[in-house]
Structure formats: structure tokens, C-alpha cells
Image (spheres, coloured by chain):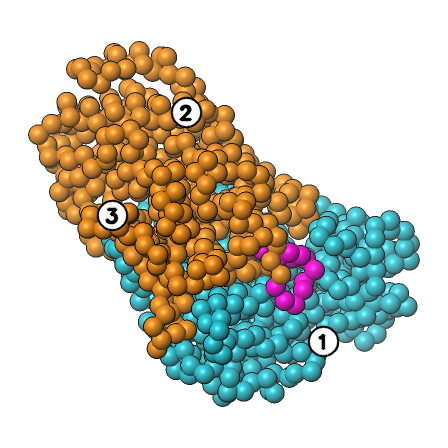
Chain colours: A cyan, B orange
Amino acid sequence: MSTSTQLDRASLQAADATDPLASFRDRFSLPEGVIYLDGNSLGPLPIGAAERAAEVINNQWAHGLIRSWNTAGWFDLPTRLGDTLSKLIGGNDGETVVTDTTSLNLFKALASAVRIQQQDAPTRRVILTERDNFPTDIYIAEGISDFLNSVNAETGTHYEIRLIDEDLSLERALDDSVAVVSLSHVNYRTGAMWDMEAVTAAAHKSGALIVWDLAHAAGAVPVDLNGANADYAVGCTYKYLNGGPGSPAFIWVNSRHQGRFWQPLTGWWSHASPFEMEESYTAANDVRRFLCGTQPITSMAMIECGLDVALDADIETVRAKSLSLADLFIALVRQRCGGFGLELVTPENHAERGSHVSFRHPEGYAIIQALTDRGVIGDYREPEVLRFGLTPLYLSFTDIWDAVEILRDVLEARDWDVPAYRTRHAVT
Amino acid sequence: MSTSTQLDRASLQAADATDPLASFRDRFSLPEGVIYLDGNSLGPLPIGAAERAAEVINNQWAHGLIRSWNTAGWFDLPTRLGDTLSKLIGGNDGETVVTDTTSLNLFKALASAVRIQQQDAPTRRVILTERDNFPTDIYIAEGISDFLNSVNAETGTHYEIRLIDEDLSLERALDDSVAVVSLSHVNYRTGAMWDMEAVTAAAHKSGALIVWDLAHAAGAVPVDLNGANADYAVGCTYKYLNGGPGSPAFIWVNSRHQGRFWQPLTGWWSHASPFEMEESYTAANDVRRFLCGTQPITSMAMIECGLDVALDADIETVRAKSLSLADLFIALVRQRCGGFGLELVTPENHAERGSHVSFRHPEGYAIIQALTDRGVIGDYREPEVLRFGLTPLYLSFTDIWDAVEILRDVLEARDWDVPAYRTRHAVT
């Protein structure tokens, strides 16, 4: 489908008719009258997930009770789901676990990388990330740094955070003080995507380790962690993987670090023999070293339903449709919503973007609210950014057409009565 | 009910008939033919919890999608559930959040206490716990200590763990090097209970802070954290609070530390303005400082159902019945199972025990398996310990009689074909 000429809805219906992913829409429960452009924040309910939860609750919990830790396979969920998820990110069996939250897993990965550098290159005490990273990625690095520095308040050997921004390129930032680089593969706000292989190589060449946050990448774009020779990765299961609200996150570690990596959240689930009740800690000699405590089974079990859908879809086909949807969205906004001040902040180059498209507008918050009221659900991110997730498994080309028509209606009407900016602290 | 004379089932039926908590059994879904003596490991399903999960999944998630973070109150779940749970542990509003796991919350509490001592008494570098504590409580302390010591591998200012055991009393262990005391209110294996008020006072007198692990106490025994003037507490919602498998844990902090305490898992949920997307960390000025990342909503929402039941029961009435059930259980085992080598490891003094009773037996693992096969579900804990949770909300006095009769049958039959000891690593 060309986006260089004037588009119309009929041509998009034709594109939908030949869409190889069209049937995946039936794998999700989506409300009538909604065009959901926020699957990169919370993916929709996969068909079967409610039944999976009911099975966990009414049979495994109510009837099996404590026995279900063994008989229903609850103990193995973190590694079993991890092995399944690993296939979507270029990982091998035994390299991924599903557990805890993305923030916590990032803490584990960064702390582990710092620890390896304490042994291999103790003068490296910089955690390098970027100013535009998702805030928790910066905050967690600060948490590690502050905690380690608290021991040495008076001495000069301090950990520090260095931020890549428009004044400091990755290349210039990578010097011999950098212990670990922490980047999001796809930026949460702009959709900009790093070249994982090239950046990983640059980090390694400089002597740093690298942690990739795949929150906005896993399930959305092809990811090949082993192909890129990455060190660690973390990510989210409730966005493009449709695991459910707040479903536990994942963490991946390259096999070459197995047996060596260490992280300080040394709960009993990471022990070599958790049920021996030993009185001192011995780390498991595998990826379970990234576990800590008991996981929320009901929320966790539903993840498998989302992963099943993702694994049934060819990721290259998903990527091709994602790019087509985004190209269409950008072209339609230009054609149909020109003159309303929407400024594209997502790179147009295919190699440099993920699966969402963002525009900046001074009244962005009000526009997103008005869109939501008319059934087009996008997302707003400070400052002034309207963010639209383009998820190929349940969006059609005509959905994009219809969404942009409604966006134009909203921009033409300008009849919102909410403030243009979100009120500080009020998440509404 | 006296337990000093010969007991019979009829007298226990009479006791059940006047049990003020008898009606609470109808608040739970329990399988037919099972006497569940493991509610201190995983509590049963409260009536209504399955419907609550279905509402979260089929309405809030499937229909509300991302909007439910606001419209369904997902954002407020950690603090709202925390305020509810606070009532059960002698906490005030704004002192408790429900989030993450007990192990992770223990990390936060210990790290926070260590940080305060770094400022107030920097020579205090000992984390004092007990050899018989639940292993994760020791392992987490080791994780903190190892992480901090990794900065100063060559210098002498090291953190260390000190263990109370039969050779080292709490009193002798409490010296001016102790930064923080970390104890379980009720021991997971023996059921032994510390005097929270006296031990807290002793810790404070020595200049240490104290963290209480309430995993086997919350919902089981009266707990008054503010009355005892404790500093921190953590605990579990899936045992006596019946929140569901792996439901998120809680953490409490005394108001006097609010605004000062700090913990290194500084994810965006602990930020003063999480949705402002600020590029550096500013901690929330309240208990939300103990939050980190996005929580598993389906598992979390069900916690409220268990808390509702717990709050409807008067804890002093619960405690009285718990002690009666345990006294009965101990008396019946002596009367009906004498000569089979069961050794009571739980203190008989009421003030010194929680709500479970444990016996040691060389073939403990096989006995627990045989009991489970006959519908009496207890638990086994290394080494050789048979552990029985006595939960007043859904157990009757005749349940205890029937359980002990089956225990006697098992001990008389001795027909098990499983190994007497659990095979190392095989959790079966």
C-alpha cells in the first residue's frame, strides 16, 4: 500500500482484506466502539486468559490448595514462561525468567553488571543511560549509585550516573569510566529505536557491559539479544505481550555470564536449594539467580495466553504491518490533520523506530482526553506528547483511517473543557 | 473446653456449637473431604475472590483497558489495601503499602534502617537476625551486606550478619555494633513467638532499629506495631490473610521515620511525581517511598476479599480459638498418638507461640505425604518437621479430632512408600 498518494478508506479496506495478520484480531476481547491505540501501555485481554485465571482460582487454588505449587506447576512458572518468552527476544532456554517488575529486574541487571565490573575493572563507576530514557530506568540507576555511595560518604570513589542527551552523544559518553550502559531499545515517548547490535558492540569495545530495556520492544519489533551479543535485558509483559495489568516482568542474561552474575536481592527463590532451608545463601547456578520471592500466580499464569498469541505470529510479518500502519498514520495525519499544529516526534526512518508514533501538541493532554471520549484511546506523556501504539495483531488499516478522522473532528471542534495540561499529581 | 481430661468427639461437637467464629467457615471455599492444616502456607479461597478477579479481567481490563488505572482505582491499590491491612497490625493510615514480595520488602526495610544508621551511628554495621529465622530473611540481609561490602573490598569497614542461636542470646548479641535487628514475630518452623514489645524496647535501648517479619503473625495473632513502637514491619498476604497464591506482600513503617526513610529500589512508583516524568529521582514524601514498579492487579485485587474477612473477625476471639485449637491438638496427639515418636517443637506457653504447631519426627516427610493422601493437609519443613497451621476462621474443634485420628491411622499403618526424607531439590 503506497502512502505517497491521496488515501481513501476503500483502499485501506482492500489492504485489510489481504492482511495476513487479520485473523489475530479474533484472539483478543476488545470492546465495541473502541479503536485501541494504547496497547503499548496495556495490551488487551487475549481470549482464554479469563478462563486461565478462573482455572487457577477455582481449581488450582480453591481445590488444590498448597498442593498446586507442585501439581499445577506454580513453582516452575518463572522459568517455564521465561523459556517461552526467550523465543521472542532471541534468547535461549535457561536465559530468561519471568518475575517481579521491570524496575526491580533493572535493579538486578544493573547491580549484577556493576558487580562484574567491580571485579574486572573496579575504576569503572559510571552508569551510562540517557536523559530521555523512561524515568524509572534513571531512578533505579540512581538508587544503586546512592546505595553504594552511602558506604563511602567521605571518600572519593563514587558511582555516578551519566546521561546521554543532545549535548552528549553515546560515542562521546563511552569512555573508560563507564561500567554499564543502560538503554531502552525503543524509547517510551518518541518511539525512537537504537541499533541494538551496533550500540552493544560500541559498549563492549569501550569495555562496558550493556543492559537493554525491552519494555516497548518485546513483541513489537524483532529482537535478537544473542545475535547482538547483549549482556542483560529486562522488559514488560503487559504491553505488546498482552499479559494483563501489571503482569510480572522478565529478565534475560547472556549465557556467558551464567554462574558468575550476582544480584543483591537474594531472596530464597534464588537459592541453590530453596527448600533445604539452609542458614546461609548459596546462589542458584543458573538464571534462577534472578528470582527473589514468591510470585503472584494468578496474574502470572495469564501471561502464557498472551505469549501463545505472540508466538503464533511471525514477528517479521508483525514488523512489516507495524511499519505500514505507522507510515499510514503519519501520512493520514499530514493529509487530514494538517494545520492543527501536530509535530511528529517519531523518526520516520524505519530502522530508527519501534511500533508507536508520537506527536507533540501544546494541548496534547486535552486532545487525548477528547479522543478517548470519542472511542479512540491513545496515551499522553509529559511534555505535550500524544502517543499512539500501533499493534498489528488487533488493529486494521481502516482502524487507522477511522482514528485519524476522529482526531480531525476533535481538532476541528476544539470543544474540550479539560485543561490543556495535566494537573500536577492528578493522574486522570 | 478443658484439655486436661480424656477428650472425645462429642465434647468437641459441643465446643463447635458455641464457637463464635463458626460462621466464618462459610466465607471460604474449601474442598470436600479435606482438613486443611496449611493455611499458614497458603490460605484458602475467600468467597467472592473469584468474582473479584473476573470483574478485574472481564470488565476492568477487557472493557476499561488503560482507563482502569484511574476509573477502577488500580493506581491506589497499594495504599488503599495498605490502609486496610494496617488496621490488622496496629498501624495507622498512611503507614502501610501492599506491594512486591516479602523478601523484597524486607530488603527495603533493612536497607532503609541501615541508611538511617549510616547517618546517625555509622559505626553500627551489624544486621542481627537469628539462625532459625526463615531463610530468606537471612539471605536478604546477606545480599545487602555483600552489596555494600563490594564497594570496599579492601578496607575494613564491612557490614556483617550476626545470628542469634542457642549459643548467643538476643541480650548478649545486642551491642553497640548492631545497626538493625531483623526478627520474625512468629517462627515459620516452630511457631515460637517473640515478645514484640519487649524485644523492640531492648533493641532501641541498645541503639538499634528493628524490622519485624509478620509473615506468620498477621491475621493470626494480635499485632500492635505502634503499641510496641516498632520501626519497620513486612509480611505476607497469602497465608492467614487469604489473599491468594503469591499475592503481593506488605511493608509498614512507623510514622516517625516518614520523610526520612529511604530505600534503594527507587522505581518510578516511589517518585514524588511519577507522571511528571522527571529526569532525576525525588522520593515521595510518604509511605509510597516503599513502592517501586507496577503491581500485578489481578492478584492484588483479590487481597481485599481476604482482608474483608479478617476485619470482620475480632482478632482477640481469633487468638483465643487459635490457642484452644492448638492446646487441643497437642493434647490429642499426646493422648491418641503417644509412642510414635512425635516430638513437640512448639512452645506450650501461650505467650510464646503463634497459630501453628509443629512436631519433629525422623520420618516427617513420609508422614506428611501419607496424611495428605488421606485428606489432612499439613506441611513439611526441613529438618524433619511436621507443621500444622491452626486457622480459627475455617477449622472446627472436630476437624482437629478427625485430623489426629487420621494421623494415628497413618502412624499405625506405616505403609508409606515414599522416602522418609525429601529428596534434595525435588519439591514434591
In this rendered view, identify the residue nearer to me: B184 or A209. Answer: B184
Badge 3 or badge 2: first in the primary sequence: 3
Q: Confirm whether the magenta stretch covers residue B275.
A: yes
Q: Are marks 1 and 2 on the same chain?
A: no
Q: Residues within 10 Å of mark 2 (few under 14, many from 20)?
A: few
Picture quadrant of residue A111: bottom left
In this rendered view, identify the residue nearer to me: A409 or B25. Answer: B25
Do we see residue B175 in this rendering? Answer: yes
Q: Is residue B248 above or below residue A43?
A: above
Residues under labels 1 and 2: Cα distance? 64 Å
On the image, the x and y values in percent for residue B419 come to 15, 46
Q: Secondary structure at mark 3?
A: loop
On the image, the x and y values in percent for residue B358 come to 23, 36
Q: Is residue A205 above or below residue A218?
A: below
Q: Secondary structure at mark 2?
A: helix
In this rendered view, identify the residue nearer to me: B342 or A298. Answer: B342
Residues under labels 3 and 1: Cα distance? 65 Å
Circle 2 is placed at which residue position? B316
* Chain of the residue under label 3: B
* Chain of the residue under label 1: A
Q: Residue at x 10, y 32 (%)?
A: B340
Q: Secondary structure at mark 1?
A: loop
Q: Residue at x 61, y 64 (%)?
A: B281
Q: Confirm whether the magenta stretch covers residue B260.
A: no
Circle 1 is placed at which residue position? A347
Task: Tell me: B293 left or right of B73.
Answer: left
- Which of the two discs, 1 and 2, sits closer to the camera? 2
Picture quadrant of residue B126: bottom left
Residue B169's label in the rendered image is 3
Q: Which residues are magenta?
A: B269-281
Q: Is residue A281 above or below residue A207?
A: above
